[in-house]
Amino acid sequence: MQRMTRQREVIRDAFERLGQPLSVQEAFEAAQEDLPQIGVATVYRAINDMVDDGWLVPVDLPGESTRYERAGIGHHHHFQCNGCGRVFDFEGCPGDLGRLAPDGFEVDSHEIILYGRCARCVTDS
């Protein structure tokens, strides 16, 4: 467990406040709202430490840089906005996807990613 510095506290608060998967850049920009002098290298180090500590987990979307979200939030999926690029969590699952696998195959896990426009981007258009 890493020592809780003011910088780490601000970064952690950004993840809690926004409640969605964040890229390093998004976490950096959110942290700057509370601590304008924070550096992006500090954010990278803090995120890596938070992953090592098990507080954050990586979220990998095809063709995108890794984002991070709070660990332990349970089974969920992701929605990526084609307008602003933000990623959101959503609950709900279609259930047993093993039935879609070819005969004789066994599904161990799944990830569903929806793409579209978030409510803000729909309103802005």
Image: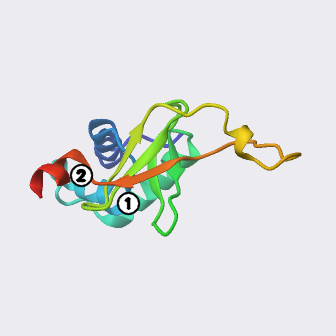
The numbered mark, 1 or 2, whose residue comes first in the sequence reads 1
Mark 1 crowdedness (10 Å alpha carbons): few <14, some 14-19, many ≥20: some
**Residue of label 1:** 24
Furthest toward the bottom, the residue is 63
Residue 14 is drawn in which quadrant? Answer: top left
Q: Secondary structure at mark 1?
A: helix
Seen at 17% across and 49% down, the residue is 120
Query: Residue 118, how many percent across, how many down?
Result: 26, 49
Seen at 67% across and 33% down, the residue is 96
**Residue of label 2:** 30
Q: Amino acid at mark 2?
A: Ala
Q: Secondary structure at mark 2?
A: helix
Disc number at residue 94?
none
- 38 or 117, which lies in front? 117
Query: Residue 107, how many percent across, how many down?
Result: 76, 43
Left or right, 16 with respect to 55, comes to left
Q: Quadrant of the N terminus?
A: top right
